[in-house]
Image (cartoon, grey):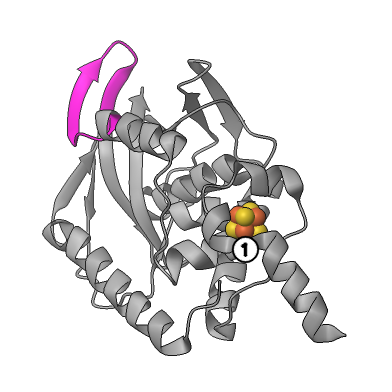
Amino acid sequence: MEVSRQGAKGAKEKRNKEFLAAFAPLREIFIRIGELTLVAPVMESSDYLPISMLNQITYCERRFWLMYVYGEMAINAPVQEGIYRHERAHTQQTRQEDNGLVHRRLYIWSDRLRIIGFADVIEDRNGQLIPIEYKRGRRGKWLSDEIQLCAQALCLEERTGQTIPYGEIFYWRSRRRQRVDFTQSLRERTKAAIHRAFQLLRENRLPPPIDHEAKCRDCSLEPICLPRETRILQQTEEK
Ligand code: SF4
């Protein structure tokens, strides 16, 4: 389904306004992590990429575009479950737990990489910060979740000066924590995803559907994206 350029521009402006409005109350807050204080700046620009969008672009560039530029969000049962799970894990607070100090829903960003977002949970284990992301379902075959978590680590490193060697992803379905090492390779993949997102936005065009049946089958945006129909149309036009 193609959307007119005018419609896309309007949708993007609306999304930007909603996005900035969501962050407005947090712009000048002080966030304490251990002995470090992070001062969130006043961000006038909307050109910071939401960290969660790195998950989307790693999965599929067209999905990223549909969600970020066109503001599409299909609420099916798995998506609804994910929202519910996230809401439960997303009450902003800091408290002492068995593993150490636990911060929930922390606002993080990187000026160098131009990304912003929230970390679900950051644990402070004897001074070592460990970002933890909560996900519905089980670990997927793609690196989407790992890249999203690694981007959080890069933000934390920029804000605190501390090296973050690893993080963890908690999958609700399996109820297990998966350790993710922030290797040089994963860091490079994460930076490449950020670079690619800004490149696509500069190019300002909807990417074509991917040719990947399994991904499209699991994609909540499939009824909006119409990958098979779009491909057939493209092939017809090329003849
Ligand atoms: S249906 Fe397939 S091509 Fe379309 S957004 Fe989803 S994963 Fe991408």
Horizontal side of residue 123 vs 172, given as left or right? left
Q: Residue at x 43, y 71 (%)?
A: 70
Q: Give the residue type at disc 1.
A: Glu
Residue 138 in the image, given as x and y percentages of width and height: 57, 25
In what quadrant does ligand 1 lie?
bottom right
Point 19% across, 46% down: residue:
31
| Near-viewer residue (40 or 126) | 40
* Residue at 75% from the left image edge and 47% from the top image edge: 213
Residue 209 screen position, x and y as percent: 68, 64
Q: Is mark 1 within 8 Å of ligand 1?
A: yes
Q: Is residue 30 left or right of residue 134?
A: left
Relative height, residue 196 to residue 133 (above, below): below
Which residue has dot 1 on it? 61
Examine the residues drawn in magenta and state their main secondary structure: strand
Circle 1 residues within 10 Å: few <14, some 14–19, many ≥20: many
Tell me if residue 190 can be seen: no
For the C terminus, which image quadrant? bottom right
Residue at 42% over, 35% down: 77
Is 16 drawn above or below residue 138 in the view shown?
below
> In the shown orientation, is residue 167 left or right of residue 83?
right
Asked where in the image residue 9 lies, by quadrant, the reply is: bottom left
Give the x, y percent position of residue 129: 39, 33
Is 187 in the magenta? no
Span of residues in magenta:
89-103
Judge whether residue 101 is colored magenta.
Answer: yes
Quarter of the image for residue 111 reads bottom left
